[in-house]
Amino acid sequence: MNSLTEEDNRPPLLVLVGPTAVGKTALSLRLAKTLNAEIISGDSMQVYRRMNIGTAKLMPEEREGIPHHLIDIREPEHPFSVSEFQNLCSRNIQEIHARGRLPFIVGGTGLYVESVCYGFQFREIGADESFRAEMRDFARDNGAQALHNRLNAVDPASAAKLHYNDEGRVIRALEVFRLTGKPLSELADQSRGDDKESPYRLCIIGLTMDRAKLYERINLRVDEMLAAGLVDEVRSLLAEGVPREAVSMRGLGYKEIAAYLAGEMNYDEAVDILKRDTRHFAKRQLSWFRHMKALEWVDIGDETKNSDLFSRICAIIAGKFQIDIEYICS
């Protein structure tokens, strides 16, 4: 890529976000080839090994020769935090930039991506394992909604962002309140520092489309995952000893199928819940991204205008990085 202007020597960072199933993966490969970029996964679930189908992970042979980072770096039984992601991602950005290539974050986990873009500061809050066990028992005896109601009573802002079935994060938010006496949402706002300048020269592109069409794509993706062997993938993980309460197994697709395999619901119920919760997740993703600074939205719903859309995205990137549009779109 051409060099940046002399007025701003921060490394460039391209970011592509959007809700699940909107079409980030195909576009990211095309952009990466055009821009001499290396992709960094901004997905909190793709870090886990052997969790491939449910995370819509590109296999090495599908990556078209584009280097991908922060994929398959953690065993499923071990949790992975946003602060770990921030540290590893920042290191990758510097290394990619040093190689003369463009760092390119692609993903849908808003907090993870935004923490890198704006250098959030995270407190080391610690953990209370006995409290976590107590909350898991409470959820088992009283239901996920009752647990979520407890969070809503002390931290309504966090409760509004978390689905009641996201048990791990609901418990963590309650745990943070127990340990600090402050809502997680308040601590997150303090860490965010909305007026903080990014350490990078950012170009953030958000993909969107008509909500009804997006939901159709989500339903189709779930069907494709099931046809590809999602049930067997979850069964295999459980058989090797990955506990259901592990953070990884609380992810979409894994907790629903695990519940089916445990006899807690039938197959059709599990599929319906998975589709419903994935649609809700997409809605929360869009809500998060709408609050991100300097994000350029691109509606990719009209597939008849794909070539025009790619040119428009190239123009956005050219404007942000002050490079020749003909150069990057050639």
Image: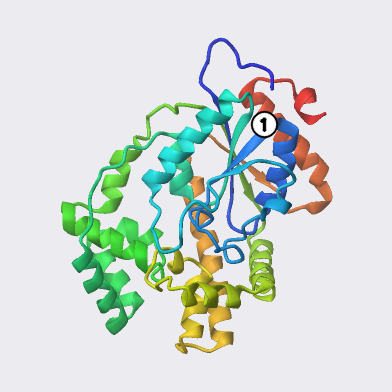
Relative to residue 310, is residue 285 drawn left or right? left
Q: How did the renderer colour the structure?
A: rainbow
The picture quadrant where one finds residue 318 is top right
Residue closer to the observer: 287 or 324: 324
The local crowd at label 1, few if under 14, some if 14 to 19, many if 20 or more residues have their Cα within 10 Å, is some
Amino acid marked by disc 1: Ile
**For this rendering, which residue is in front, 242 or 264?**
242
Residue 197: x %, y % from top left? 42, 26
Q: Secondary structure at mark 1?
A: helix
Q: Give percent across and percent down for residue 43.
A: 52, 52
Name the residue beneath numbered marker 1. 316
In the displayed orientation, state which residue is furthest to the front.
240
- Examine the rendered structure and indicate whether residue 34 appears above or below residue 210: above
Residue 21, by quadrant, is: bottom right
Q: At x 21% / y 73%, what residue is drawn?
A: 134
x%, y% of residue 218?
64, 66
Q: How far across and how far down the image is residue 152, in percent?
A: 28, 65
13 is higher (above) or lower (below) than 18: above
Residue shown at the point (61%, 41%) measured from the top left: 39
Q: Residue at x 61, y 17 (%)?
A: 4
Image-quadrant location for residue 115: top left
